[in-house]
Image (tube, helix red, strand yellow):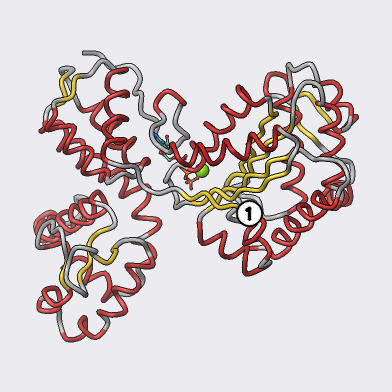
Amino acid sequence: MVKESSPFTPGVPVPIDFFVGRRTEIERLVQSVREVGGGKQRNVFLAGERGIGKSSLARVVRFLARRDHDLLCVQVLLGGVADLGEMVRRILERLVNDSRGQVWYDKVAELFGKRVREVGVLGVTLSFESPSEELEDLVRSFVPALRRILERIRGQKKGLLLALDDVNGLAEKPAFANWLKSVIDEIALSEEPVPFLLLLIATEERREELIQHNPSIARVFDVVDIHTLSAEESEDFFRRAFDRARLKVEPDAQRVLVQAAGGFPALLHELGDAVYWLDKDGVVTESDAYAGVLEAADRIGRKYVQPRVIREIHSRRHRAILHKLVAGGLATSIRRRDLATRLSAEENRVLDNFFGRMRKLGVLIPDPDGEPGSYRFANQLLEIYLWMEGQRARAVRAEAPSAAGKGK
Ligand SMILES: Nc1ncnc2c1ncn2[C@@H]1O[C@H](COP(=O)(O)OP(=O)(O)OP(=O)(O)O)[C@@H](O)[C@H]1O
Ligand SMILES: [Mg+2]
């Protein structure tokens, strides 16, 4: 069987066809969309950990708001942005771009005059003659600018949905929190309705950081937070995606994959993709699934665990404890007192510290089913990866005397 393209999309928001779950959250978000369609202003904070599916959910809501509620919908990626001027420039640029081909395009583009530059098939860019001053002005007069845009799309669109995606960098700045608050206040005080839905997307920690900068943020934003998917939703996802790829999946294989993913959307895709390419005969068996788990663990390790976990563990003793923790094979629950018996006195002295650090890094979580002082891995792939790393390190050590100089 020749494989052409995987239906799995690790690392990018999921196509609507393969989107699963999030019913309650969609309903809540659509409720806000409806109110905005009726002329109100609403603010929602979409929170959740990295890779949990925030951008994907926002995309679905954007799709529904456009299709069923006549809103102009814009999602702006602000990942690397930490400056308000640049933020506003990107918002407006996205708005102009997303208006291309629409009847209101000229009316909206006209607002920016010669600052709009067509760059062929790529779309338009907005560039300013004296960027810092003009952009600072736009930051300050964001609400009037918004109002003018809404005027120009009136009759075609009932309002605007603006999703500011990945405001992690901006959330560090007190100026951003204060800007948000003043924009919202200004709209609230205005005589005319401003049909505008502001959807902020970031992790829960960033939301808390914003609240520290400006406590009113807690009050003015409704919070929609998303967590892992259920086993049924994960199954549904695999079924749809493998069906599309015309692969048959045996029930045992399905079970292995669902369990390994632990409901993390990003892991569903990594696992599915690994299995898709590993399988050779169009039937995914349990052993294909296990091979996929190892492959996915390896990929995830390199992409997420290395940069976010391994490199963050600076203490030699913490590393040693982690190795000993996984050396005994995969365990469902980790009992502190069992681990302690395998550690040196020196390592035991930093054990509290170690558990604190691992919790902070999202590696271990308290085991709700275990006795007090027991933990488990936040997800199984993480554990498998660490175990593989340990095995590799051991293999390298064993080979080292005779195979010195042969590389890894
Ligand atoms: N509901 C879903 N159904 C199926 N796949 C999903 C779903 N939500 C997310 N995914 C997939 O999970 C991965 C992560 O999703 P997404 O990029 O939306 O997460 P995110 O929370 O925005 O992550 P980040 O914090 O890194 O921006 C992607 O591969 C995406 O395709
Ligand atoms: Mg995202």
Q: Position of residue 296 (x, y in %)?
A: 26, 40
Residue 155 is drawn in which quadrant?
top right
Decide: is 285 above or below 383.
above
Q: Quadrant of ligand 1?
A: top left
Left or right, 2 with reference to 285: right
Task: Give the residue displayed 66% in from the left and 48% down from the top.
Answer: 43
Q: Residue at x 86, y 23 (%)?
A: 107
User: Where, by quadrant of the figure, is residue 247 drawn?
Assistant: top left
Query: Which residue does the numbered mark 1 point to in the structure image?
Result: 221
In the rendered image, residue 158, in percent from the top left (x then y), is placed at 74, 28
Please name whichever residue, 170 or 36, is drawn nearer the observer in this view of the structure.
Answer: 36
Residue 203 is situated, as x and y percent measured from the top left of the image, at 51, 55
Residue appearing at x 14%, y 55% in the figure: 391
Residue type, numbered disc 1: Phe
* 342 lies left or right of 43: left
- As rendered, which of 210 and 316 lies closer to the eye? 210
